[in-house]
C-alpha cells in the first residue's frame, strides 16, 4: 500500500469529506482530492490517474453505485479499488454493491479503526 | 303574478293559457304552465347537477389518491421519527465531543504542570548554575517529563480523533432532514391543490406569515436572521439594545 497514492473522496456532504480526509491523513495518506457528487467525480477520474476511490452512495446527481458501475465499465478506470462509506444499510444494497465490484463497504456511523481495517484488507487482497 | 324574474312567456302562450282555463281544460293549462317554467327549472337543475357531479368527482379523487392517505398514516409519523433521530444524534455528538474535550483538558494541564515544575531547574542549567547532584535530578525529571508527554500526547491524539468522528452527525442528520423537507414540500403541494380545487385563491395563503409579538412569543433559535427585522444578530446587539434602554 503506497501511501502516496492519489485518493479521491466523494460525498455530497462537505463535513463527511472533511472527516474522511482527516482520517486518511492520519493514516499517512497525503495525496487526497475531493468531489461532491458522482457526476463531478467521474470526469476527475477520467482525467486524473487516481489510485483509490472512497465514495458515498446517496448523492443527488450520480449515486455512488452508478459511479462504481461507471468506473468498472471504463477500461482505463476498471482497476481502481473502490471503498463505499455510506449510511445505506439495506442488505440488497450491500449485495448490489458487491456484485457491481466494490472492494469494501463501510456503514455510517463508523470508527477510525474500521476505516483502517478495511483499507488494510483491500490492499492486502490486491497484493 | 310571476315569481320568477325573466320567465320567458310569449303572448301566444298567455292567450293559450287563458283559453285553456276558460274552456275548463285544467290539465292542459297545468301542462302549459309547466312547459313555460320548465326551461328555467331545467337550467337550474342542470347547473346543480353539474356542480354536484364535480363535487362528487373531486371528493372521489381525494379518496382515490392514496398519496394523501400515505402522507397522513405513514409519512408524517415517519417524519416525526426522523426529526427525533436528528435530536438524538446531535445530542450524542455534542456529548461525545464534550467528553473528549473534558478528557483532554487534564492531560494538557498535567503536561503544563510538569513543564512548569522543571523550568526553574532548567533555567539554572542554562545559566550554568547547577551542581552535579542537581543536574542528575534535573535529568531524571526531564526523563519523566518526556515519557509522560509521549504517552499523554498519544492519548490526546486519540481523543482528538474522537472529536473528529463525532462530527459525522452533520452528514447523517442532513440526509434525514432533506427527506423531511421533501415530505413537507409534498404536503404543501397537496394542500395548495386542495385549496385551488375548491376555488380558494392560494395567493393570500402563500403570503409568508410573520409571527407577531404576542402571537407566539417563544420561537426558539431564529433560523433566518437576515430576513427578520425584529431580532438581534448577536450578543453585541443585545448589549447595545439593553444599554440604549438604560440597563
Image (cartoon, coloured by chain):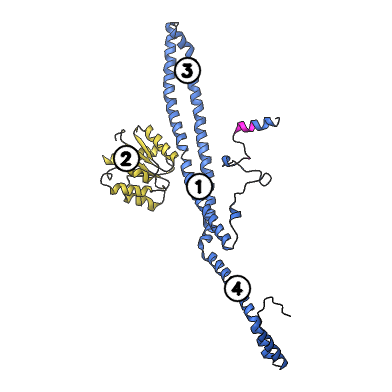
Chain colours: A yellow, B blue
Q: Is residue B234 magenta?
A: yes
Residue for point 53% across, 60% down:
B68
Circle 3 residue? B115
Q: Mark 1 vs mark 4: same chain?
A: yes
Q: Chain of mark 4?
A: B
Question: Is A47 included in the stretch rendered in magenta?
Answer: no
The mark lying in front, picked from 2 and 4, is: 4
Is there one chain holding both mark 1 and mark 2? no
Q: Nearer the viewer, residue B123 or B184?
A: B184
Check disc 1 and report the residue beneath it: B177
The chain to which mark 3 is attached is B
Tag on residue B94?
A: none
Q: Gap between marks 1 and 4, in whole Å? A: 48 Å
Q: Left or right of B75: which side holds A118?
A: left
Could you give the CA–CA distance between mark 2 and mark 4, rounded to whole angstroms? 71 Å
Question: Is the residue B227 above or below the residue B114 in the image?
Answer: below
Residue B42 image point, x, y percent: 61, 78
The answer for how far apart the CA atoms under marks 3 and 2 are is 44 Å
B208 relative to B14, above or below? above
Name the one closer to the observer, A20 or A32.
A32
Amino acid at each position: 500500500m503506497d501511501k502516496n497514492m492519489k485518493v479521491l473522496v466523494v460525498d455530497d456532504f462537505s463535513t463527511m469529506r472533511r472527516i474522511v480526509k482527516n482520517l486518511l491523513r492520519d493514516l499517512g495518506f497525503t495525496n487526497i482530492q475531493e468531489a461532491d457528487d458522482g457526476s463531478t467525480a467521474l470526469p476527475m477520474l477520467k482525467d486524473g490517474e487516481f489510485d483509490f476511490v472512497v465514495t458515498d452512495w446517496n448523492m443527488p446527481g450520480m449515486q455512488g453505485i452508478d459511479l462504481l458501475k461507471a468506473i468498472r465499465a471504463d477500461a482505463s478506470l476498471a482497476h481502481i479499488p473502490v471503498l463505499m462509506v455510506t449510511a445505506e444499510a439495506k442488505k440488497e444494497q450491500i449485495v448490489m454493491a458487491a456484485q457491481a465490484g466494490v472492494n469494501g463497504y463501510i456503514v455510517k456511523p463508523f470508527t477510525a479503526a474500521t476505516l483502517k481495517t478495511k483499507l488494510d484488507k483491500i490492499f492486502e487482497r490486491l497484493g | 303574478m310571476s315569481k320568477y324574474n325573466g320567465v320567458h312567456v310569449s303572448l301566444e302562450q298567455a292567450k293559450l293559457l287563458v283559453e285553456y282555463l276558460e274552456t275548463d281544460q285544467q290539465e292542459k293549462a297545468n301542462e302549459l304552465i309547466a312547459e313555460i317554467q320548465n326551461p328555467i327549472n331545467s337550467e337550474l337543475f342542470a347547473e346543480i347537477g353539474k356542480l354536484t357531479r364535480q363535487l362528487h368527482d373531486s371528493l372521489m379523487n381525494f379518496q382515490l389518491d392514496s398519496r394523501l392517505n400515505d402522507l397522513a398514516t405513514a409519512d408524517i409519523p415517519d417524519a416525526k421519527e426522523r426529526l427525533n433521530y436528528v435530536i438524538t444524534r446531535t445530542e450524542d455528538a455534542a456529548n461525545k465531543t464534550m467528553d473528549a474535550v473534558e478528557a483532554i483538558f487534564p492531560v494538557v494541564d498535567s503536561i503544563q504542570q510538569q513543564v512548569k515544575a522543571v523550568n526553574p531547574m532548567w533555567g539554572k542549567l542554562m545559566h550554568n548554575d547547577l551542581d552535579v547532584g542537581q543536574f542528575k535530578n534535573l535529568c531524571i525529571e526531564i526523563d519523566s517529563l518526556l515519557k509522560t508527554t509521549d504517552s499523554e500526547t498519544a492519548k490526546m491524539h486519540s481523543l482528538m480523533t474522537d472529536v473528529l468522528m463525532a462530527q459525522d452527525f452533520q452528514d447523517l442528520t442532513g440526509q434525514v432532514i432533506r427527506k423531511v423537507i421533501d415530505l413537507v414540500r409534498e404536503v404543501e403541494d397537496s394542500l395548495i391543490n386542495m385549496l385551488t380545487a375548491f376555488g380558494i385563491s392560494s395567493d393570500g395563503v402563500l403570503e409568508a406569515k410573520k409571527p407577531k409579538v404576542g402571537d407566539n412569543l417563544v420561537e426558539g433559535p431564529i433560523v433566518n436572521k437576515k430576513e427578520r427585522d425584529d431580532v438581534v444578530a448577536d450578543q453585541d446587539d443585545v448589549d447595545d439594545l439593553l444599554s440604549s434602554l438604560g440597563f
